[in-house]
Image (tube, rainbow, N blue to C red):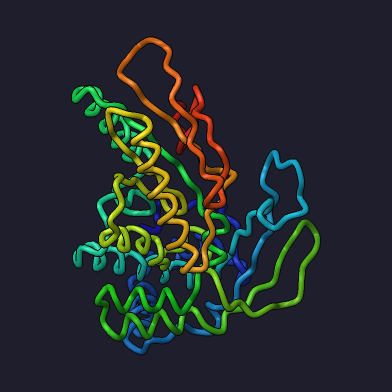
Amino acid sequence: MISNYNNLSTPGPDKLLWSYLKSILKHDEYLINIINIANACINLGHWPAHFKRLSTIVIPKLNKQSYDLPKSFRPIILLNMLGKLIKKVIGERLQFQVAANDFIHLSQLGDLKFKSTIDAGIALIHIIYSGCVKNISTSTLAFDITQFFPSLNHHLLTHILQKAGFDICIVNFFTNYLIDRKTNYLWNNFSSPIFDINIGVGQGSALSPFLYILENCLKNLNIPVSIISFINNGLFISQNKSFDISNSCLFCSYNVITKLLDKFGLIVEHSKTEVFHFNRSYSPFNPPPLDLSSIGGSVLTPKNLWKYLGFVIK
């Protein structure tokens, strides 16, 4: 696994590079010691304070009209390198255990082994063409969760692990992993004092079980749509003879999901919500707009060109 990591990745507070660890792990004696550390962390339910010391680089997002709001920036968390390696190994174990317990909803295609944006694109195209075969139209509603990773609630994450049926050692480890974390913030040449972190996880964290919360809750939700999810955004899909019926289904589902996420302390970024329709006809068609204004959104006019997860659809 470690052979795939870039030797030029920015190091964390310990200033170690992957190239150093790759050299060290060539020796069986050192490799065994690191494995013993990882096993001890799990068995004792403890994450050493050295690994809880982080650095956070604040990077402005491109092409923003204003940089007066926090959402115009992306925080990148840098971890101590040995802790990062052990965390990735533990994350791999957690993912396989979650999959074995059938806790991952089939619609979740993000941040999972052997799944990618290509799978999401193929799944969407298959659904659209299957609708064409049945002579029904396909309508989609894409939504984005704002400040997803920095907003995750630690108590909720621990509860998710318990509900997933993890061993008490895993739950205790993860609970300890989340507390007493500290970071300083780096922005250009500025370096802040050290602050405590009591909410959120690093973007793309290998130990973030929240990636499965939405899909797990959707197992028990009675919503009239299908869903594809990719980490911090989702796609509702409705197939009907009438665009008006599809819009009603999308409206209902969007209302449910925004209220559900609000209970989790998360917010759907309405300004990024988009609607797109697919029709078997090759001639121009004018589907009706989707009015989300009564539930906090806006009136969405279907576009002729749609960019989603790196795909351009028209």
Residue at image x 29%, y 68%? 93
Of residue 149 and residue 16, the one placed in the foreground of this image is 149
How many numbered callouts? 0
Residue 196 left/right relative to 216:
right
- Considering the image in quadrants, where does the C terminus appear? top left
Q: Which x, y percent locates residue 140?
A: 39, 36
Give the residue at the far bottom of this rendering: 44
Up/down of 12 relative to 39, above or below = above
Name the residue rendered at 77%, 56% in the picture. Answer: 188
- The residue lying toward the viewer, choosing from 248 and 165, is 248
Q: Is 192 or 231 nearer to us in this picture?
A: 231
Q: Is 147 placed left or right of 23 in the picture? A: right
- Residue 156: percent from the left, percent from the top? 43, 75
Can you give x and y, in whole percent of width and height, for residue 148 in the image? 52, 59
Outermost residue, top side = 283
**Image quarter for residue 128?**
top left
What residue do we see at 48% from left, 36% from top?
290
Q: Using residue 267 as the reference point, say whether residue 86 is left or right of it.
A: left
Does 225 sit above or below residue 204?
above
Which percent across, then down, holds residue 126?
A: 26, 31
Q: In the rendered image, which quarter contains the N terminus? A: bottom left
Q: Is residue 296 above or below residue 155?
A: above
